[in-house]
Image (cartoon, rainbow, N blue to C red):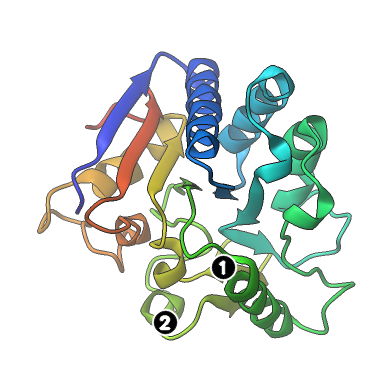
Amino acid sequence: MTNPRIEVFDDAAALARAVAGDLLARLDAAQDDGGSPQIALTGGSIAERIHVEIGRAGPSSDVDWGRVVVWWGDERFVATDSDERNAIGARRSFLDRVGIPADLIHEVAATDTAGSVADAAAAYARELREHGSGAFEVLMLGIGPDGHCASLFPGHPALDVDDQVAVALTDSPKPPPERVSLTFGALNRTRAVWFVASGEGKAEAVARGLAPEGSPGATVHETPARGVTGSPTTEVVWYLDRPAASRL
């Protein structure tokens, strides 16, 4: 694995504030260099806390939100207005609050806008090819208790897909069963990978994700989060609270 930086915070609130502050600083720096940074968001409870912090601090920051492009690493294939969609919480807590233009927010199609989850995955792949910059500035990912990231689960055939940008899942072991996920090939095209994890329930998966090669459970098929390391120049950071870091 790329040597990651591990940041440990006292609790989830401190973790969320730190990640939000680091993202605002990174976006501002990228824009100072003339870029229009593209970011990929994740879902989950700690991501929601991070989004709340960005939504609180973002409007008064130096970031030009009209030059930030937003994607998701994965999405649940449910109705557009379903609270199960990662995009719903992100819009409510973050994106609408800072005023990112609608045409810069690239959501995965929903059950009421796509004929099937396969159609949604194909459309999302086309959109990323057409409007992506070639690399995310920051890719945020959570990690599940089983070691999954995005919607790439242990032992699933999607882990071995290397000729597609996005894949459709119809049998996710975690509900809802239908999902769209970027593949490792797409996820690894990023300048920074930020894993975020909170709570003791994530501690074992975090330990496996960061374990030396050859350790028990330390393969991509057992712990898919190990498959997202970017390139040799990618910044890899694991943002953890103390309970999530308790087995390191």
The percent position of residue 26, horizontal first and vertical second, equals 48, 33
Residue for point 34% across, 46% down: 205
Is 161 above or below relative to 46? below
Q: Is residue 216 among what the camera can see?
A: yes
Q: Which residue was labeled with disc 1?
A: 181
The label number, if any, that marks residue 19 in the structure image? none
The percent position of residue 43, horizontal first and vertical second, equals 62, 46
Residue for point 40% across, 68% down: 184
Is 95 above or below relative to 243? below
Residue for point 85% across, 64% down: 79
Point out the image quarter for the N terminus.
bottom left
Using residue 85 as the reference point, say whether residue 186 is left or right of it.
left
Q: Which residue occupies the foreground of this view, 123 or 225? A: 123
Q: Which residue was labeled with disc 2?
A: 161
The percent position of residue 150, horizontal first and vertical second, equals 51, 58
Residue for point 26% across, 41% down: 207
